[in-house]
Image (cartoon, rainbow, N blue to C red):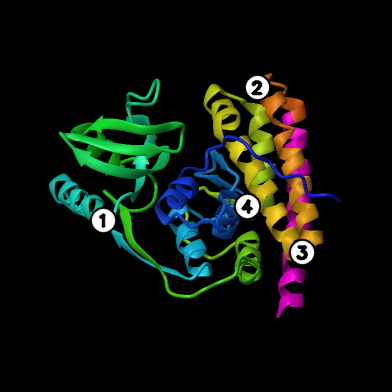
Amino acid sequence: MKMLPYIGSGPYCYTNSLLMVLDDPVLTPGLVETLTGSAFGFQLLFGQLPLFDAYGWDPDLGLDQALTLLGYTWQAHTFQNEKDALNALKEQVSASPPVFVGPLDMGLLKHQPESDRASGADHFVAVLDVKGGRVHLHDPQGHPWAALPEEVFLEAWKAEQIGYGQPYAMRTDFRRVREVKVPDALRALLPEAAKWAAGRDLPVPPGTLGGRAGLERLAQMVEQDFNDGLRGMFIHFSIRVGARRKTDAAAALALIGETETAKVLQTQARVLGGLQYPAVQRDTSTLAAGLRELAELYDELVGQLERSTTHSL
């Protein structure tokens, strides 16, 4: 099976923001996203919110993993009040721009159309400078050199409704302390990917389901009550990012000869991406059937990753 890469827009906010800060010509969004481990699972957060990332996974954990696999160290900062946060951001961006900032609440980033209230949707940006009472930033959602009043940016940066991390978070002082070739980083990813797919013993919100059980429950939800909130999550975020993550992971693992795992991931991506139309059109029977097909493929991915890890030892 030929791996068919995807090039185009998509909600890779933390990956794209990180690449703007690292400025490493070897790294690509697809590679970094794959190294975060996001492609290797599914979780139904709170038993309600469908996320095509691994059970217990969040962007902070994923970034830690990707940076470590690539040989980087960094400093993570959080603050308890907006004054300290803003002063630290000004100091850091003056010394070494841009600065990796997030999570922020996307609903409060008011340069984005129709963003006027906290949504709990996480977002990441690269801050370029803070001048004249405004925070200038590259927003990977499609807004280069966006400028927000300091007070508006700080309200979003507080991230009160984000379900992980701490308020006013940023990462600085990225240093590559080990030279790691891309194939070596991908091989080192395999045992971590197997653990994500099998389900790590991590704290999760009440009611959260992972893997096959989560997908089967989601199929039932679609059949019983495909409400506007669930449909909106599908059509605006979950399907798009999930299909791209799996496509990128398939292409990355094919590079190191993990063709069987790559095939499973590409098949998952094809099934998941094909659900965009039925989700938009409210074709719940086709959507539920596709989710159950993904549940079957989930077990196949877990087994293949376990075999790949065993062979790589």
Q: Secondary structure at mark 4?
A: loop
Q: Nearer the viewer, mark 1 or mark 2?
A: 1
Residue under the image location 31 percent in, 53 percent down:
170
- Residue holding disc 3: 258
Question: Would residue 205 be seen by someone viewing this image from the given angle?
Answer: no
Q: Is residue 276 magenta?
A: no
Residue under the image location 25 percent in, 43 percent down:
129
* Disc 4 to disc 2, C-alpha distance: 23 Å
Contact between marks 1 and 4 (CB within 8 A): the answer is: no
* Disc 3 to disc 1, C-alpha distance: 39 Å
- Residue holding disc 2: 280
- Residue holding disc 4: 39
Q: Position of residue 68 (x, y in %)?
A: 48, 68
Q: Secondary structure at mark 3?
A: loop
The answer to which of 170 and 300 lies nearer the viewer is 170
Label 1 vs 4, first from the N-terminus: 4
